[in-house]
Image (cartoon, grey):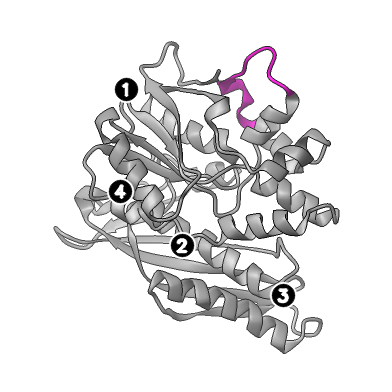
Amino acid sequence: MLSRIIAESPLKTLPADLLVGIETGDDAAVYRLNDSQAIVATTDFFMPIVDDARDFGRIAAANALSDVYAMGGRPIFALAIVGMPLAKLPEDVIHTILEGGASICAEAGIPIAGGHSIDAPEPMYGLVGLGIVHPEKVKKNSGARAGDVLILGKPLGIGILSAALKKDLLSPAGYDEMVRWTTKLNVTGATLADMDGVHAITDVTGFGFAGHLLEICRGSQLDCSVEFDQLPLVGEAVMHLMAGIATGASARNWASYGGSVALPSDMPEWQQKMITDPQTSGGLLVACAPECVDTVMAALRGDGFDRASIIGRFAVPGGAAPRLTFT
């Protein structure tokens, strides 16, 4: 729906310095300031996915800044987006949410320089993230090349853990794993911007692994083959999926793009739900030349992404439209 609304925008002629807009559903807008600097701009906010106020603030902030890193940018400052039910939520809880977000920004080395707040029926929090990148080093989701290797930086299953949490079925260890990955900044994206062999980057969020990978395929006009057994998965998420716990968004995701995904005839249903599971502050998806794989993996592992995995490869389309195939 949003795509249709935006397509009807009265502004038909875009400025030449707008390097990334809405063309391929990329992670952030990028506008060239001069020959050596472009500004990366993005925003993201949502309602609580955990009960702990500080964790909510941290997760929302990390999720918002992820799109700056996914473009190869380095954040420079953020603006807070705050909607809180002032008559229902104690002031100290609101303070704790904002402090959690500020702590993630401090970890990224940036200030929260302002923002906007309203009295809202439900609590909402997020950031406008602003960053800088060299205009020639922007990593779009449409730059993958045939023969590129696909790497995923974080394990899948965050949406399932969130669903289990809402049903009071998530273990303390599962909660810790959920917070660990959702608050881990995708800082490696800024490092990957300096690598000529890295051709495309995106991060995995609400459309699930398959949905965001399809964005790379469609933007780059390439097919991609993924080995499911190579995907890094959160162990407790697999357990809950096999017990029948999944998000409603997983089914909606499949309905929206499943026709472009080829699955093995014997693939268990839980595996299909895993690849469509919506992620919050998910991992980077990186398309890079084969000779660059070791360097990319070393960068990810050096930043603490110990579950980063080589999972697939891109190829020239075998049909009229790009497809994603799981083996």
Q: Measured along the vertical axis of the image, is residue 12 above or below residue 146? A: below
Nearer mark to the viewer, of 2 and 4 = 4
Q: Earlier in the sequence, mark 2 or mark 4?
A: 2
Query: In screen coordinates, is 125 left or right of 246?
Result: left
Nearer the observer, disc 4 or disc 3? 4
Dot 3 corresponds to which residue? 120
Q: Nearer the viewer, residue 1 or 157?
A: 157
- Name the image quarter holding residue 94: bottom right
**Residue 275 is one of the magenta-drawn residues:** no
Q: Residue at x 64, y 69 (%)?
A: 55
Q: Position of residue 86 (x, y in %)?
A: 74, 84
Bounds of the magenta segment: 256-268
Contact between labelled residues 4 and 2, with CB atoms less than 8 Å apart: no
Viewer-closest of 126 and 305: 305
Q: Are marks 2 and 3 in contact (CB under 8 Å)?
A: no
Whether residue 140 is visible to the viewer of this picture, yes or no, is: no
Q: Which residue is mark 4?
A: 192
Residue bearing the label numbered 1: 146
